[in-house]
Amino acid sequence: MPPSDIHVRFEDVTKTFPGRGRKDPAQQVLRGIDLEIHRGEIFGIIGQSGAGKSTLVRLINGLEPVTSGRITVGDRVVSGLSERQLRAVRREIGMIFQQFNLFRSRTVAGNVAYPLKVAGVKQPERDRKVARLLDFVGLLQRANDHPEQLSGGQQQRVGIARALATDPSLLLADEATSALDPETTQDVLSLLKQVNRELGITIVIITHEMDVIRQIADRVAVIDSGHVVESGSAYDIFAAPKTPEATRFVSSTLRDRPSAATLERLRVSHPGRLVTVRVQDRPAFQNSLSVAFLQRDVTADLVFGGISELQDRPVGSLTYSLTGGEGSVDELLKQLRADGFDLDEHEGASR
Amino acid sequence: MNDFDWEVFRTAIGQTFFIVSISVVVGGLIGLLLGLVLYATRPGNLLSSRPVFILLNVLVNIVRPIPFVIFLVAIQPLMLTAIGTTIGTNAVTFALSLSAAFAVSRIVEQNLLTVNPGVIEAARAAGAGPVSILLTVLVPEALGPLILGYTFIFVAIVDMSAQAGLFGGGGIGDFAITYGSQRYNWPVVYISVAAMIILVQAGQFLGNYLARKALRR
Ligand SMILES: Nc1ncnc2c1ncn2[C@@H]1O[C@H](COP(=O)(O)OP(=O)(O)OP(=O)(O)O)[C@@H](O)[C@H]1O
Ligand SMILES: [Mg+2]
């Protein structure tokens, strides 16, 4: 990938909040972050609450200064710039928020006009632009309303229009759909997709919702206690997480793997060996499993599982209770592993 | 009402209007400025500066609890250098403006502190500078409560302007003392009190109305 196609680059970035004394010690929130976000993609950042996601995006437009390391946006190093220099950078980066953060003292149109005023765009041009943006987000009729007269989804649309006012090439979305109901989340996500596809704007979206990643992210970074523990294409991470943190995180959002408590219950009602098979995007996945069960004369009871879709490909896992004659389950497992199936046996099942 | 001098009463009302309006405007503006500085320099805020904040904070804390009549006496040296006199309507107006400024500064600071930090973040993300955010985001966002705060100060100023009557500062309070209580002319006292009540009510009504408009309720 040529350097110009990297839109945002983190190089060994750390962030420590100073703290205010003995009771509030300094806190290292991000450690050694290396990331490359490509121009024109939707990059998801997923992690548990407190992992440092918000802090990470706020470093990109300099709302928080880095403690060490380097952040480049386009071909400009933004880390270490003064507040005044950052103002120009921020006009090229839009931002939307979980709580929308609209100005209650301004109308819908006034909110969208705000960044244009800040940028010194003069009157007829400003009105034209506001109208075009409100039309884009489908709220032209509501131009003279105040934010509190709109639903949450509509308010976020205003937030998006405001963020796009100065024609940014990068949009930062911090939990942009977390305050919305599932249906409205869909609307906002498809609008973001439209922003990405039609306007070619790179989007960095933070979330703790698998669904958001599944629907729009091209690539993802999983962050956990201030580290990027894994990054890559959204499909690869959800289909085959490599690190334990990513696995734990992915299964906690997919809910396809039985929890310890569920395993206990399953053991009571199912005498067989409990094995979880990861769903793979290969032809006749299910069928080849069934054939293998039959061949080895193993009875396989499907006891737990979940399959969903990511970038039009299946992800998830199925948990079976396997029973069979002397040694046949062992042989089955050996054969499946040899055939490239990804298996996890839950020990302590058969006694 | 044999002994009621309408001419003097009109003059007194005129003086009260003068004292109150100048104090509200001058004290209000200086207070707004001080309040903005207090808010902005608070550690962690837009123009955070610990020394400026502490200095101003301590100054406001010292001045605010001083009862107005004592303040009026205490700043006589300052008055003398600034306006060349320590008595009369101008002196009262000067002291009242200054005293009001300190009270207003706290009201402004407190109301700005209630503004959702998220909107400040949104304004910063849009590339706005600190002074622009203070004036074009924070003040408008807090406008409703600010108007109510200023209304409160208006009432306090009317109150204090009357107290200043004890020092011959002119205005309705002075009138009520000089022509009313000192001559046992109770109708004069009651009419003065009624005038004060009407003034306060009118101010409160206007303040409530404007605040309601700002809050769109
Ligand atoms: N301004 C700040 N001062 C001190 N500590 C902070 C500050 N902002 C965030 N933190 C701390 O940094 C850590 C990471 O916070 P951050 O908001 O980045 O997490 P997050 O991943 O966005 O969490 P969530 O999903 O809950 O929004 C938290 O422990 C938080 O307490
Ligand atoms: Mg967050």
Image (cartoon, coloured by chain):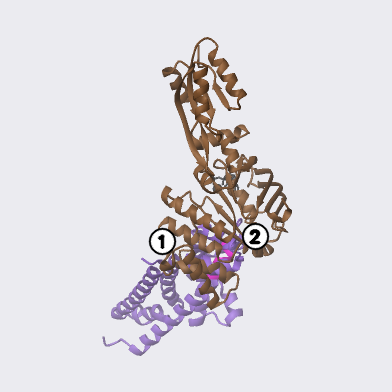
The location of residue B55, given as percent across then percent down, is: 62, 62
Q: Nearer the viewer, residue B50 or A226?
A: A226
Range drawn in magenta: B31-39
- Residue A88 visible here: yes
Give SS at disc 2: loop
| Image hue for chain B | purple
Q: Is residue A294 above or below residue A194?
A: above
Residue bearing the label numbered 2: B49
Question: Does the magenta portion include B37?
Answer: yes
Chain that bears disc 1: A
Chain that bears disc 2: B
Label 2, residues with CA under 10 Å away: few <14, some 14-19, many ≥20: some
Amino acid found under the numbered disc labelled 1: Glu
Give SS at disc 1: helix
Q: Which mark is residue A148?
A: 1
Q: Is residue B97 above or below residue A190?
A: below
In this view, the mark in front (1 or 2): 1
